[in-house]
Image (cartoon, rainbow, N blue to C red):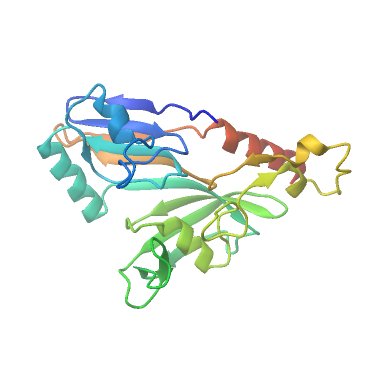
Amino acid sequence: MQLLQPEIIYEDDDLIVVNKPSGWLSIPDRFDASKPNLIAFLQKKIQNILVVHRLDRETSGLIIFAKNENAHRSLNQQMMDKTAEKYYLALTEGIVSPSEGEINKPLAESMTRAGTMIVARRGKDSLTTYETLEKFKNFTLLEVRIHTGRMHQVRVHLQSIGHPLAIDSIYGRRESISISDIKIKKLHLKKYQTETKPMMERTTLHSKKLIIQHPTTQEKLTFEAPIHKDFSALLTQLRKWG
């Protein structure tokens, strides 16, 4: 399947903001630099690209890069000071209750499963807040804000309260969703074979909004990125059947 191309949302002399499609790495793979990644994509037109933060390969949405050392230092400091605001759309399993709240649990790398995170006392302080946007029969759409930038933070925190992402091959209960997972009445498979094909096969997580202070002008900038077609189609079917 051909991947969508990244979309440049904003660019000036100091920074560049991209709407990353699912399937793209934020930075080159350590072992296979040929895998689609944003650094290689951007360096075709911009020589100096500096990483400020990252998104998981399957997560879509906003990500920002610096174009010089001064901008990189300023943006990194905003991330560390928690003055930069990062908001996500997250479709989760079940009906989340209470409808809004915070998850304040330390996160650490797993000692038994490489490349994954767990809630652990030895971990670093991690804070996530959320509020419900929509409720469906078996799913909840949340707006999530991360106040710290730990790896897999949203995914692990939501799992820790019993509501993992609706699709999450590592921390969740399923790797895809088809229309048959949504419709209330059982489908006659022969009649609706096409409806059992997956509608979405990646994490139901999208970086939707990013608020920063411009590193040079000090202007407050707000960026927003619409969800991609697969996520949009899934929400449409949930509103219809869920």
Q: Residue at x 26, y 23 (%)?
A: 44
**Relative to 168, is 14 above or below?**
above
Residue 230 % position (x, y): 59, 35
Residue 114 % position (x, y): 39, 64
Quadrant holding the N terminus = top right
> In terms of depth relative to the viewer, which is nearer, 91 or 28?
28
Q: Residue at x 57, y 31 (%)?
A: 229
- Residue 61 is left or right of residue 231, and the answer is left
**Relative to 230, is 12 above or below?**
above
Residue 146 % position (x, y): 38, 54
Residue 198 % position (x, y): 67, 41
- Residue 215 is left or right of residue 57, and the answer is left
> In terms of depth relative to the viewer, which is nearer, 1 or 161?
1
> In terms of depth relative to the viewer, which is nearer, 227 or 24?
24
Which residue is most to the top?
45
**Relative to 33, is 80 above or below?**
below
Q: Residue at x 85, y 43 (%)?
A: 189
